[in-house]
Image (cartoon, coloured by chain):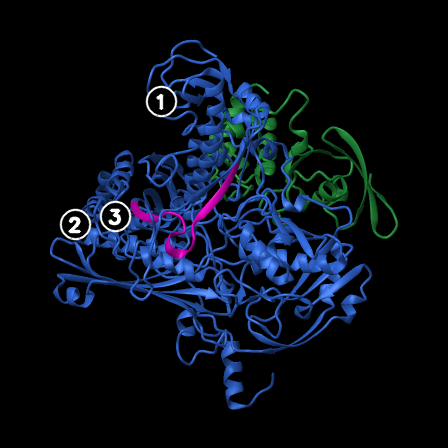
Amino acid sequence: MSPKKRRFSRTWLLGRPETRVDGLAKVTGEARFAGDMDESDQLYGAVLRSLHPHARVLSVVTHEAVAVPGVVAVLTADDIPGSPLVGGVIRDQPVLVTDRVRFLGDGIALVAAETEEAAQDAVERIGVEYETLPVVDDPREALEAESPLVHDDGNEVVHHVVRHGDPDAAFAKAESIYERSFTTPRIEHSYIEPEAVIARPVAGGGVEVIGSIQNLFSTRRALASVLGVALNRVTVRHAVIGGSFGGKDDVMTIMACRAALLARRCGRPVKMVNTREESMLESYKRHPYFLDYRVGLDGEGNPVAMRIRAVADAGAYASTSPFVTYRSVVQAAGPYRCPNVWTDLYAAYTNNPYTGAMRGFGSPQVNFAVEGLVDEIAEDRGIDPLSYRLQLAYKEGDVTPTGQVLGGHVVSLPEVLNKVGEPSGFVDKWWRYRAARSAPKAFRRGIGLACSYRGVALGAEGVDAAAAMVQVQSDGSVLVSSGITDMGQGAQTAISQCAAEVLGVRMDQVGFLDTDTSRIPDSGPTVASRGTIMGGSAAAEAARRVGRRMLDVASEITGYSAGDLILREGGVWRSRVGRRLQPLYLSFEELAGECFNRGRSLAALGWFNAPPTSWKEDRGQGIAYFTYVYGANVAEVVVDTETGRVRVEEFWAAHDVGKAVNRQGVTGQIHGGVAMGMGYGLYEEFEVEEGKPKALNFDEYLIATAMDVPKMHAIVVENPDPAGSFGQKSLGEPANEIAAPAIVNAIANATGRRIRDIPAGLERVLLGRKLTRSGPRGSEAARETSCKTGRGHT
Amino acid sequence: MSGKKDNGRYAVGLTVNGARRDVVVQAGETLLDLLRRHLRLTGTKCGCEVGECGACTVVLDGKAVNSCMVLAVQADSCNVTTIEGLADADGLHPLQEAFLEVGAVQCGFCTPGMLMSAWAVLQENPGPTRAEVTRAIAGNLCRCTGYQMVVDAIMQAAKKPD
């Protein structure tokens, strides 16, 4: 250690680009994903899924399946000891159906066998008698009184409102009124790792489950309830997870329950791995939305009234629809001042694949709509879209449609807008490309802008708290664990950094333990971009507790007051941040050893509670989220006006993250979010016709490849927030939620055509509509006619 | 040469990561099955089984291939390199180091296949352009990184002596 006098900066290793703690195993192939794991005496589980999107199940005959050599068990819903239904918000989804299937992914029976082939063979020998029911495939029709019912107590999953001011009176005085409708597609998470799990029976009627599981604690709750055992009989761990993006939640809960039922019945471990086709068929998707916006403006172009109505397709089960639409209803009006806003957000059951959490969680849909609308208004008014947004954008002290006064943090919307506007040359290019539209050129350039504000963490959706454990070993090495799951986003690294920051140790002194529900308190789900702020703050708290005890011992050894000592650079210093004092020659390792010898506890649990929020559901008013993040994106595109092909050439993304914990991780999140958002804008749609998906693998469901992505500029804005331990906030979802509108606005700048339905594929860009057949084909029409008249043959 | 055995089984002899391996496979099994099931080399991933995602990429006689699209018997007498063969006794391959340094790894599921595609292109062309590298990994889907830092990492490794 250097004997020189030192002045310490505010932070030690926070904000540096840090190599991932799980990186080495991932580049050598040693990282074990759930599908890579095997137990010596394991069986293979398989699922019989429905043949019809909506039908009564009259009978299930299993004796042929039971007789297949190698089959150990065949189970139906009758074999479930506890509750057959699961669901985080509304308990409406069967682990195995009893008498009715509601979408093609529903499971009817399970098989466990000695080999995968025997399990699959047996599944195909299970006989099911169905009585088909009418298929509900449009959520708007589902809400009509005469619609067939998907669930007996009605098709409306939820109806959230926001009632702020008096839009009708304001519309009456408005200078101009815009009415526009938008649609957004159902999309697939497309994590590259298909779902996998292994369940092992343990003494006392419980199970241990390891898998590609995003939300360990909600899966544990469901397992306990389905097996009819206490939470302490169930342990859930995650393997290395190959991407999730919100997607490995409910679908993994169902898979874990199925494997656990088989494991308990057979008394042996059971492994289940989905093929890509099974994954796409069964897993939930991002909600398609149908959105209607009405905006009234005063003479200066300021919005004075908004009426918004949106209907989300929940599919067959509620999943997180009530929460997804909560975020939509809060953020639907965009980050723009408007004194009178009424919003109605519905989610409706259909017989389509169910929809749930996906990166953005109800924001990409409303952001696409409001950002397209604001962009159009700017152009009509002869103002560039950046200046117009700066005119309307929230500033500190503004009031959101839920009545929340924005404050206590930096409302950095103008800052992020300028930070993408300047380097991209937005204003100049926007006018130039617009003027060039009239020239007879096949390839036209365009530039587009979008911005957003986003509530951090769960908000008034639910209880928001998280735990982390820090244990310093007698040799000075550190173990960190947390209830937050790493799905690839880098939570283990960021949370480790928060602990290392407080203890003043290097990252190579820290090890991170994979999350285990029996060894760390329930920390809620790893969703809502809450990992770094919640898990990181809890880890900082735990490290502070341990650090204080260590400094007490250092004080005993040295005689200096603990308040004059600091842990930094792998040792104890007689110093304070920003002050020049004498160093002290005591290494972290020596101090840890001394603490151990003196019998001091060097383990602590940190618990972080989010600041309070509030919500009045009847009028949609309250402190919807304890703080917000702000982001802005600019896309520059080239449109081939002869084919409709759009190439995104360059992209600027500025996000206020509060405080960047791992700068490399921040950049990676932004790039990945942009690529995924580009897919949403241009390529991706999980098409379903009459409840049947039209594509179940990556040959037909297209996501962006390396050839498609633009040159991306990640612009990190830091305005530390008082809520997080170091000022950190959120990024994963903000990075994904406004790429699509930026791109579609760029297409409008290039072509003059406003696309209000995404994805903006060739047809929509070239023709302004999608080429899909409307109405039945001739042969089908003939059949329908013959059925109606009772003539003809089938 | 692969030899036919009973019950539609075949004996396959091949070199994997420098070592001679003899495996008896079913007629329908793929090279991916051979690696993962028979040799327990689970670094090579199974993502789609239709040759679209590239997670199963290995290098077969110098070419990057989707191992889910190659029958195990077709790999008879061939030389296969998988992710487990990339590092050697001296440590990580420069590509692996660059992936870590640059931040090309997030969830890591596509990483082995991505590294093998990168390794194959650098074997053939030690000084590729950015466009050539991008094309070389066009068959490897990644949902986390947006590819930019992956290409950055491969370009960085290409500048280092192997």
Q: Nearer the viewer, residue B3 or A249?
A: A249
Mark 2 vs 3, N-terminal side: 2
Name the kind of residue labelled 2 in the image: Gly
Q: Residues within 10 Å of mark 3 (few under 14, many from 20)?
A: some
Q: Could you tell me if residue A309 is visible in this image?
A: no
Determine whether A706 is above or below A164 in the image.
Answer: above
- Left or right of A223? Residue A431 is left
Observer-side mark, 2 or 1, equals 1
SS for callout 1: loop
Task: Please name which of the two marks, 2 or 3, marks the residue nearer to the observer.
Answer: 3
The magenta segment: A448-469
Nearest to N terminus: mark 3 or mark 1? 3
**Subunit under mark 2:** A
Q: Residue A54: which disc?
A: none
Q: Position of residue A541 (x, y in %)?
A: 44, 36
- In the picture of the structure, the residue carrying the numbered disc 3 is A406
Q: Is residue A456 magenta?
A: yes
Question: Looking at the picture, how far across and down is residue A650, in whole percent?
Answer: 36, 38
